[in-house]
Amino acid sequence: MDYRNNYFLSSDPKDIIHFYEGFENKEELIDWMKERPKGSCEIMEVEGEKDIIVVIPTADFEGEYAKRCREEIFKGLHIIFVVSGKGSNYFNYAHNCNLGIKKAMEYNPKWIVLSNDDMYKIDDVDVLKEQLRNISGENYSVVFTKPSKYHSTLSQIIRINYFYKLFHLITNYAAGRIRLKQYKKFSVEFESMKSKYALFFSFPRKGYHFIEALDFLIFSYKFVEQTRGDIFDEIYVNAREDVDLSLRMSLEGKKFAIIDYEIGDYISSTLGNNDNTRIRDAANLCYFNIKWGNELQKLLILKQRGSGQI
């Protein structure tokens, strides 16, 4: 297990390619994801008002991002930091989020805010409190905010096609070629994309739309209680777990509200957003396709029939 994890986390793309070459099929890859340890973490709390509790996964409690969260962005609210530690060989974002959310439930809050640490303040925390006071957690499962480039955005499921493949080859031929080879090996057929980009790749067929949570989302106590705190699927390895959750909530018809509160995000400042990250993501996209493939196939067929395209 360790040697595979080391290849997977390597900063050398050749090692990541070697990681994928070690699996004969997608079933073997998913088995590895299921067996991979969740890593260790520590809960650290900052006292504050407990009607709204903020859960923040972070690699460094004393770091710039975590400090900004507790002293500026969410000052006055009770904050639960789930600290994984720098250089953790095993790290699972979904697992850490679930741990923090379960800890927050011990205080019986009305709302649980899940936020990445690499955010920046736009609206004051009093705006967040006032907006949440005006809605009932009994009526809504989740709350989205004003959309940013990376949260509360309208996304859609598309079927990977020629235009999608061409886009990857044009934008970065080397990395795109690797990703497409992985997709072919592991039978990856569906992808999620922001709607404004997906139009180019799903034309003329329209995809299935939903609001994507990404790095900031607010849960009602009632919703978390129903899930027993197991909000995220921990088989994912640090990507796609938020897409999975957003799609699941949409398919289940969970009621949501949108509040007039704005917060900014620096986007992948902690884990990074480079070619290696995108190559690693093939494993998560593979699992996403296995988990949702049949359902997505039905959705897209219904969508196409409804628009008279087939």
Image (cartoon, grey):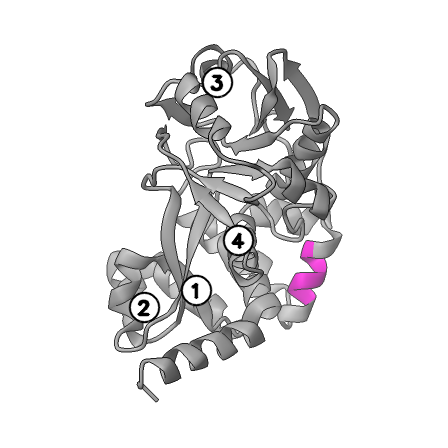
Q: Which residue is mark 3?
A: 74
**Amino acid on which disc 1 is placed:** Glu
Residue 16's label in the rendered image is: 4
Residue closer to the observer: 276 or 252: 252
Q: Secondary structure at mark 2?
A: helix
Label 3 vs 1, first from the N-terminus:
3
Q: Which residue: 48% across, 36% down?
A: 271
| Distance (Cα) linking label 2 and label 1 | 10 Å
Compared across the picture, whether 98 is left or right of 273 comes to right
Looking at the picture, how far across and down is residue 70, in whole percent?
51, 14
Image-quadrant location for residue 180 = bottom left
Label 2 vs 4, first from the N-terminus:
4
Q: Is residue 49 visible?
A: yes
Above or below: residue 292 compared with residue 9: below
| Distance (Cα) linking label 3 and label 4 | 38 Å
**Amino acid on which disc 2 is placed:** Tyr
Q: In this picture, which residue range is highlighted in magenta?
A: 28-33
| Distance (Cα) linking label 3 and label 1 | 34 Å
**Amino acid on which disc 3 is placed:** Phe
